[in-house]
Amino acid sequence: MDNIVTIQNVSIDYPLRKYSLRAVTNLSMDIKRGKITALVGESGSGKTTPSSSLIRCISEPGVVSEGKIIFHEQTEDGVRDICVNDLSSKEINEFRWTKISMVFQAAQSALNPVMTIRQQLYETMVEHGSKLTKKEMEERCIELLGYVQLNPDLVLDAYPHELSGGMKQRVMIAFALLLDPQLVILDEPTTALDVITQSYIFNLLKKINEEKKISMLLMTHDISVVARFADYIGVMYGGRLMEYGSVEEVFEKRRHPYTEGLIGATPSIIGDISGMHPIEGSPPNLLHMPTGCVFHPRCQYCNELCKTEEPAAYVTESGCSSKCHLRRE
C-alpha cells in the first residue's frame, strides 16, 4: 500500500552531561497514505518523541542519532521523496504545516493567551510561507472554522480563555488544516475533555480523514479509541515498536504479550469486567533498561531466551510485525 512516511531504523537520544538517554530504539514503520495510524502504549512508552521527529520538534536536547525519516510528497507529477533529517532550518519551517502539521496535546497551552484566534491564525499562515492576501486569509479562517463547526463571528475575535475546552481543541484542528497538509499528527487530542466531547472530536477527525483524504498519525493510551477510529496500529513499549499492523489483525491475533495486556486491561461498559487483568509491574527505566526483551520483567510468557536476547521483528505475509520470541499465531 502507498506510504506517506517511511521511518527507517530511527533512534532518538537525549545527550546529557554525564550520560545519554535513548528514548527510541531502531524504530521502523510506515504511515499509510489516506489512513489513520495510531501509536499506543503507556505513558513514557515512546509515542510522542518519534511523532515529533517527523517535523523536527523533539524537545531539547533530543536528537535523531540514527536512521532516516522519508516523507513521500504527493505532487501533480507523482511522488517526491523528502528526507526530513536533511532539511535546513528554512526548509523545515516551510515544511511544517504545508506538508505535515500537528494538533498538540493541551490546546490551552498551545494557544497564545494574549492574542485573538484571528491573530494567531494569520501569524501561522505568514510564518510558514503562505502567500495569501489578507482577504484570502480571512476567507480561509472563516471556511475552516465553519468546517470544524465553530461560529467564525464569535471565535475569530475571541481570546483562548473565552472558549471552552472542546472549542479550543477544534480551533487547534483548524490550525492544523490551515495550509492543506498531507499528514496531521494528533498528540492525545482529547486530553482533559469529557467523554461526549471526546467522541465529538474523534468523529470530526474521522470526517476530515474521509472527506479531505488527509493521513493522520494518532498518539493515545486509550486502545478502545484506536479500535473505533484507526486503520493501523503500532504498539510502543520502552521506546520500541513491539507490534504493528492493521487494527483488525492486531486485535484479533495479539501476537505480542504487551498488546494482549493492553487489550485485556481495557474496561467495557456492557461486558463482564471479571476477565480484566492489569499488566503487573511498571514501565522500564530508560537509564537501566532490562537485558533481552524489554518487556520480559512483566511478561507472563517469559523464558530464559527472553531474558538474554532481544527479539527481532517477525513479519507475517500480511505485513503485520511483532517482536516476540514466541511469535504466537
Image: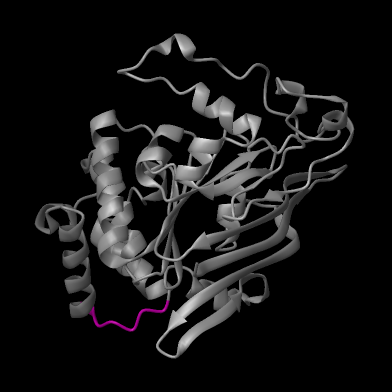
Q: Which stretch did the figure color magenta?
A: 129-134
> Left or right of 91: which side holds 14?
right
Q: Is residue 197 above or below residue 246?
A: above
**Residue 43, can we see it?**
no
Which residue is drawn at the image coordinates 23% and 38% (left, top)? 164
Nearer-the-camera pick, 116 or 185: 185
Among all residues in the image, which is located at the extreme bottom? 77
**Residue 135, can we see it?**
yes
Nearer-the-camera pick, 272 or 76: 272
Residue 264 at x, y percent in the picture: 51, 22
- Which corner quadrant of the image does residue 99 belong to? bottom left
- Which corner quadrant of the image does residue 319 belong to? bottom right
- Residue 131 among those drawn in magenta: yes
Nearer-the-camera pick, 221 or 266: 266
Which residue is drawn at the image coordinates 46% and 86% (left, top)? 78
Q: Main secondary structure of the magenta part?
A: loop
Quarter of the rendering occupied by the C terminus: top right
Residue 280 at x, y percent in the picture: 65, 16
Residue 138 at x, y percent in the picture: 19, 71
- Which corner quadrant of the image does residue 277 belong to? top right
Q: In this view, does 46 lie above or below 130?
A: above
Q: In this view, does 259 lie above or below 268?
A: below
Which residue is drawn at the image coordinates 74% and 54% (left, top)? 11
